[in-house]
Image (tube, rainbow, N blue to C red):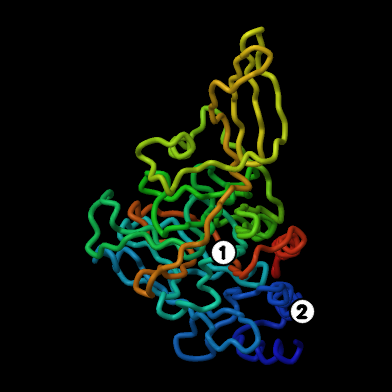
């Protein structure tokens, strides 16, 4: 391992001795030695010549370094705005691995830069996690300034949704797995997984998204170095296919979150109740084989109301007396667990490279064209299995003592 790490370090042009002294190689090894490791972009390792794009650390023997291009997705899909370059991602010079890129609050609506790995360069590779039995972990080290949208992943939301102005280049959604900086809960860590590449529960958007109860630190992007240094958050998504469970992580912890009545996600309630707008194959009925608790809400001689908690839902059950027995007379979903989230599917498998989305960092293609997440990204890592709590905690430790403060 030492010999291969040493050879890798020779390609890190511009890596200063201070970074080496702070244990850069050991930090990289903390990630790459975890079983199931696929890729780590740390924004330190770059191509040795040419355009010097950011490349990923890869498992031994892998020759595809997953070099990232700079792109403005508005230019590609709306034929508007200027081209993006690496100059549009200022470097911080500090971070969990010694470097980070900045995502700014762009004021030009036609300019939404992102780093992108085109589908053709990784389709059917170990990064293209999909299909029967496959699990995934996606981790990013970030400093949040603002915004709640995408940080990294394979999550092209589609340009066929017909809002915010029609796109010149129309494509359907091509979603697999991704990390977001909150979505409906600003500042939370949010994972996303998709079984169909498109929408959920009769909505135009996808809804399988575990979201942490805890919130990440939020600071201005131009804060003093000592403030930025203590503001790193490690966010993550794990999907365990065997357990049918997706979880969002913040700083090594799966903090629980429930969506309580009145449930804000009306599409989830429709999927649970079997609303006509929800396709039959997208109904959402988390298992009730294990009872966590039963509390009696009210009781008379003729009727009893119970609140039953299951691992992923809370159900209000009305029982009516029939002779010496109680019979169920009604059920109401009063809460759904947002973290962890029950996901009884396989990750979407695109039928061809043309129908698969790119892997992107910083933003994803989406019709809203909002500014999205702003702040710093100091690393993105992918694994082809669901990591354990101990492994996620070890990755979170890297953000607590960043190189350079």
Q: Is residue 259 above or below residue 218?
A: above
363 vs 375, left or right, is left
Mark 2 and mark 1 in contact (Cβ < 8 Å)? no
**Eyeballing the image, is 356 above or below 181?**
below
Task: Report crowding for label 2: few under 14, some 14 to 19, many 20 or more residues within 10 A (C-alpha).
Answer: few
Residue identifier under label 2: 21
Residue lying farthest to the front in this orientation: 323
* Helix, strand or loop under label 2: helix
Residue at 48% from the left image edge and 63% from the top image edge:
362
Q: Residue at x 26, y 62 (%)?
A: 170
Percent x, y of residue 73: 34, 65
Task: Name the residue tied to disc 1.
Answer: 377
For mark 1, does the 10 Å Cα neighbourhood hold few (<14), some (14 to 19), or many (20 or more) residues?
A: many
The x and y percentages for residue 112 are: 37, 62
Q: Considering only order in the chain, which callout, 2 or 1, is on the residue closer to the N terminus?
A: 2
Q: Is residue 298 above or below residue 332?
A: above
Q: Which mark is residue 117?
A: none
CA gap, disc 1 and disc 2: 22 Å
Task: Give left or right: position of 119 versus 62.
Answer: left
The relative height of residue 137 versus residue 219 in the rendered view (above or below) is below
Q: Residue furthest top?
A: 301
Using the rendered view, name the quadrant where residue 144 is placed: bottom right
The x and y percentages for residue 240 are: 63, 59
What residue is at 71 percent from the left and 73 percent from the top? 35
């Amino acid at each position: 391992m030492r010999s291969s790490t040493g050879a890798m370090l020779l390609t890190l042009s511009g890596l200063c001795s201070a970074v080496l002294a702070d244990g850069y190689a050991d930090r990289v090894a903390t990630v790459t030695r975890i079983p199931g490791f696929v890729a780590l972009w740390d924004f330190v390792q770059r191509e040795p010549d040419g355009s010097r794009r950011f490349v990923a650390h890869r498992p031994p023997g892998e020759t595809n370094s997953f070099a990232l291009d700079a792109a403005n997705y508005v230019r590609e899909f709306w034929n508007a705005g200027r081209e993006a370059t690496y100059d549009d991602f200022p470097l911080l010079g500090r971070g969990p691995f010694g470097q980070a890129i900045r995502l700014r609050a762009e004021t030009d609506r036609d300019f939404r830069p992102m780093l992108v790995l085109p589908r053709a360069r990784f389709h059917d590779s170990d990064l293209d996690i999909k299909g029967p039995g496959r699990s995934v972990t996606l981790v990013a080290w970030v400093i949040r300034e603002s915004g709640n949208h995408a940080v990294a992943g394979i999550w092209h939301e589609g340009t066929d949704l017909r809002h915010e102005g029609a796109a010149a280049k129309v494509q359907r959604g091509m979603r697999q797995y991704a990390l977001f900086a909150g979505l409906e809960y600003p500042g939370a860590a949010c994972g996303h997984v998709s079984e169909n590449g498109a929408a959920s529960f009769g909505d135009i958007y996808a809804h399988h998204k575990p979201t942490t109860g805890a919130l990440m630190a939020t600071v201005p992007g131009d804060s003093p170095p000592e403030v930025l240094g203590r503001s790193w958050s490690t966010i993550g998504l794990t999907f365990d296919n065997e357990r049918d469970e997706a979880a969002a992580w913040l700083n090594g912890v799966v903090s629980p979150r429930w969506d309580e009545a009145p449930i804000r996600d009306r599409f989830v309630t429709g999927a649970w109740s079997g609303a006509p707008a929800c396709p039959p194959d997208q109904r959402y009925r988390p298992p009730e084989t294990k009872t966590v608790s039963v509390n009696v809400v009210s009781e008379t001689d003729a009727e009893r109301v119970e609140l039953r908690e299951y691992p992923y839902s809370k159900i209000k059950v009305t029982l009516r007396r029939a002779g010496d027995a109680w019979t169920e007379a009604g059920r109401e979903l009063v809460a759904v667990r947002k973290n962890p989230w029950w996901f009884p599917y396989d990750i979407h498998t695109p039928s061809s490279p043309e129908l698969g989305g790119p892997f992107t960092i910083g933003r994803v293609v989406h019709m809203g064209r909002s500014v999205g997440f702003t702040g710093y990204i100091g690393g993105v890592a992918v694994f082809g299995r669901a990591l354990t709590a101990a492994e996620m905690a070890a990755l979170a430790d890297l953000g607590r003592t960043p190189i350079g403060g």
